[in-house]
Image (cartoon, rainbow, N blue to C red):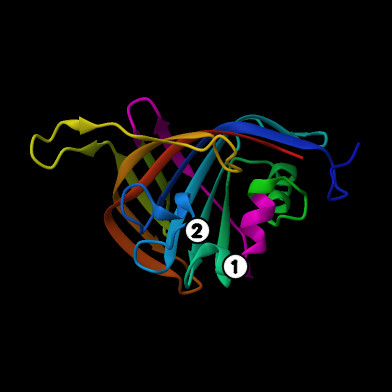
Amino acid sequence: MTSGAGGPRWRITGEEISSCNCAWGCPCQFNAPPTPGNCQGVAGMRIREGHFGDTRLDGVRFAQILAWPGRIDDGGGTMQVIVDANATPAQRDAVIALNSGREGGPYFEIFASTITTFLPPVVARVELETDRERRTARLVVDGLIENRIEPIRNPVTREEHRARIVLPGGFEFQEAEMADSVYLKVQTSQGLAFQYHHTYGQLNPFDWSA
C-alpha cells in the first residue's frame, strides 16, 4: 500500500516540544502574524511508535531548526533537520523523507510548502527530555541547539500558571500545553543563528500518518 504521495504508508505517534521567538501563546496559532514579525524556532520529536513502510521508527528522535522572514504562510522559510545518531541508516532516511513533505501527511506537507531553503540534514546526538504534565523539557544537539522549557510563572507570586491551546481541527496538534522557553539558542554551520529568553514554549502529543 502507498500513501497519497506515492510512497510507503507511514504513521508516527509520540511527543513534540517546540520553542520560538513569539510571546507566550504564539499568535501564529490563531492565524495572526508572529509577535516580532518574523518566525525563528526549533522543534524536537520523540517517536513512541511508528513505521515508514517496513522500517520501524519506535524510539527515534529528531529535531528541526526553522526560520521564516515573515509569516509562516508567506513562505520563504529555511529548515534544517537533525536525526539522532542512534537511528539506523534506514530510520534516518525515513525521517529525512518525511520532513521533505513529499511522503504526505498534513504536518510535513504544510511546513515543507513554506520552505525555500532546505539546509543539509545533520546526523548528531539529539538529547530530548519532556514531561508534558509538568511542562518541562530540554532539547540539546551539541553545537546546534540548546533549548530549555519550564512552566509559565505568575510574575507577582511566581506560582506556576497553566494554560492550554485546543485546536480541534489542528494539523499539528489538537491540544498543547503552553510553557516558557526559558532559553533557546541555535547556531548552524550554514550561518543560521538566533538566541532568545522567556519566549513561547509548547508541549504536545502527536499522531501523524499518510
Q: Is residue 200 left or right of residue 144?
A: left
Q: Which residue is mark 2?
A: 65
Give the quarter of the figure containing the N terminus: top right
Q: Quadrant of residue 2?
A: top right
Q: Which residue is mark 1?
A: 119
Disc 1 packing (10 Å; few <14; some 14–19; many ≥20): some
Give how far apart the Cα atoms at labels 1 and 2 are: 9 Å
Residue drawn at the location 60% of the way across and 67% of the way down: 119
Spot occupied by residue 93 in the image (x, y as percentages of width and height): 73, 50
Pick whichever, 141 or 79, lies toward us: 79
* CB contact under 8 Å: marks 1 and 2: yes
Q: Is residue 146 visible?
A: yes
Q: Is residue 135 magenta?
A: yes
Classify 155 as above or below 207.
below
Amino acid of disc 2: Ile
Residue drawn at the location 19% of the way across and 38% of the way down: 153
Residue drawn at the location 29% of the way across and 31% of the way down: 162
